């Protein structure tokens, strides 16, 4: 019965210029008509959207002729772009042309160059723990003192190690924490001898503004140390003598973003628990045998909940550290971003993301969590977070100026290949031309035999 009725309906529709398709007891009809043909009442009911629909003319009066109203150029509205932090804004007019068009003046990030307005006077020399690098320290310190006429300062622990060396009696040190808090007031730049750990230690010594850092690779990995120790007698003068404000007279420098992290107890900041992080801040479950629960907020808005081993908030510099081991993206140090990387999340859809450097984040242990969590800052200063505790994370105002060997991008790619063996594989071998020709002839012969 249903098929008969569908066929009958289809035949009736054909007579009126329609096609009908029976489907689940209903008749779905699609109408068509030749251009210029007069439409029947049935077609008008089924397909009301036709060329004869009324349109609004420019004066607001409807007309049924189907003719488009004439276009009139009324000019463009003017606007401006403003930068804002959520509380205040300032006009940013350099991206707007004629108050109507948005245009970039150039790349949002560019290479930076360090040029001394006055010659440096004091240098802080840091080295890897132990006495293995004392000979290298002696060479660098004497070069800075005798060749470059710079005052050399070392940490108290290193000062005790070299106290018996008569050829380093010119080296100074500081005695107490009060002097350590004033290093930024008299240190012009820092020399690091060792690996990445020494660079992280240098960042820890300067919770505020940090002087430029030049690092010599004497460690095990050295992703952040692109200068070779054997070339210190060339690289150090190049840096110190870049004090004439002429084009390309300075040295290239990478401004490595840091994160400012404040520990909160029940919504109140804990005194003495603010950290400057160069790599990452990690919140994990510690020694607990079950999943940790971490609520993630951006400017007091809940964005997600982490259920797993933990979560990382990393800088672009830290993207090649713990974050890459947890499956995060590798990010160039000049990209203004904060990496949000879960650690072993109990969800197949929880992927790492990149947030803008303007994001202000909070990682909070909810009151309903089964256990506590632990926070660490560049792998140090572990702090337990109880239910209701949190950490506030935002971009620091003070980056780490890292002196480049060549420039920031070339040094970065060299470190990727040298330290992480990035995209290393054997090249695909080319075809042997004689073998290719022979194979083509063999295939042709087989095809002829087949036919």
Image: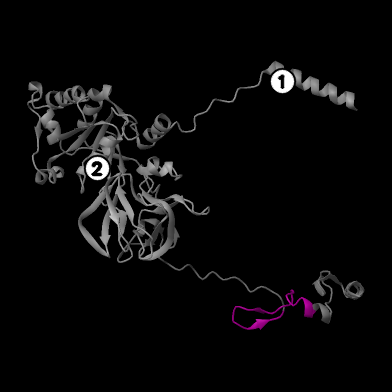
Point out residue 293 in the picture as x, y percentages from the top left corner: 40, 58
Find residue 179 and report its image quarter: top left
- Identified at 23% across, 61% down, the residue is 269
Q: Between disc 2 and disc 1, whose residue precedes?
A: 2
In this rendering, the answer to whether 428 lies above or below 403 is: above
Q: Is residue 63 magenta?
A: yes
The foreground one among 386 and 266 is 386
**In the current view of this chain or complex, which residue is farthest to the bottom?**
61
**Residue 151 in view here:** no
Label 2 crowd (10 A; few <14 / some 14-19 / many >=20): many
Q: Secondary structure at mark 1?
A: helix
Residue 436 badge: 1
| Residue toward you, 212 or 387 | 387
Check disc 2 and report its element: helix, strand or loop: helix
Instruction: Sort mark 1 into few (<14), some (14-19) or many (20+) by Cα contacts within 10 Å.
Output: few
Q: Position of residue 420 (x, y in %)?
A: 42, 33
Which label number is shown at residue 214? none
Residue of label 2: 203
Q: Quadrant of residue 154?
A: top left
Q: Which residues are magenta?
A: 44-64
Looking at the rendered image, the quarter that the N terminus falls into is bottom right
Foreground residue, 213 or 378? 378
């Amino acid at each position: 019965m249903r098929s008969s009725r569908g066929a009958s309906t289809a035949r009736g529709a054909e007579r009126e210029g329609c096609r009908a398709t029976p489907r689940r007891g209903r008749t779905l009809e699609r109408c068509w008509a030749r251009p210029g043909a007069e439409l029947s009442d049935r077609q008008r009911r089924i397909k009301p959207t036709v060329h004869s629909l009324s349109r609004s003319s420019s004066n607001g009066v409807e007309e049924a002729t189907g003719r488009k109203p004439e276009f009139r150029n009324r000019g463009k509205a003017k606007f401006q772009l403003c930068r804002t932090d959520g509380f205040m804004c300032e006009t940013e007019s350099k991206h707007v042309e004629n108050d109507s068009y948005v245009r970039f003046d150039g790349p949002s990030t560019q290479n930076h160059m360090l040029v001394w307005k006055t010659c440096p006077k004091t240098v802080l020399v840091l080295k890897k723990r132990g006495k293995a690098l004392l000979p290298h320290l002696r060479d660098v310190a004497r070069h800075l003192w005798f060749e470059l006429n710079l005052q050399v300062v070392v940490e108290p622990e290193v000062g005790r190690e070299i106290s018996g060396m008569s050829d380093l009696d010119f080296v100074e040190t500081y005695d107490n924490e009060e002097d350590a808090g004033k290093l930024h007031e008299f240190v012009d730049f820092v020399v690091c001898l060792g690996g990445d750990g020494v660079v992280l230690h240098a960042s820890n010594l300067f919770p505020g503004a940090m002087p430029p850092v030049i690092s010599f690779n004497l460690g095990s990995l050295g992703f952040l140390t692109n200068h070779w120790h054997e070339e210190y007698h060339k690289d150090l003068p190049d840096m110190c003598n870049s004090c004439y404000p002429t084009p390309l007279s300075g040295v290239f420098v990478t401004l490595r973003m840091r994160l400012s992290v404040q520990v909160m107890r029940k919504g109140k900041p804990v005194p003495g628990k603010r950290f400057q992080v160069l790599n990452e801040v990690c919140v994990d479950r510690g020694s607990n045998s079950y999943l940790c629960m971490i609520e993630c907020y951006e400017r007091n808005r809940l964005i997600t909940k982490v259920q797993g081993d933990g979560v990382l908030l990393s800088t672009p510099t830290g993207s090649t550290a713990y974050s890459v081991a947890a499956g995060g993206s590798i990010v160039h140090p000049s990209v203004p971003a904060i990496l949000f990387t879960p650690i072993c999340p109990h969800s197949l859809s929880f992927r790492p993301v990149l947030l803008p450097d303007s994001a202000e984040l909070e990682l909070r242990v909810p009151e309903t969590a089964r256990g506590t969590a632990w926070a660490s800052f560049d792998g140090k200063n572990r702090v337990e977070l109880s239910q209701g505790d949190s950490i506030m994370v935002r971009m620091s105002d003070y980056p780490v100026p890292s002196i480049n060997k060549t420039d920031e991008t070339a040094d970065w790619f060299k470190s990727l290949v040298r330290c992480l063996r990035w995209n290393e594989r054997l090249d695909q071998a080319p075809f042997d031309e004689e073998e290719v020709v022979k194979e083509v002839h063999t295939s042709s012969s087989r095809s002829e035999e087949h036919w």
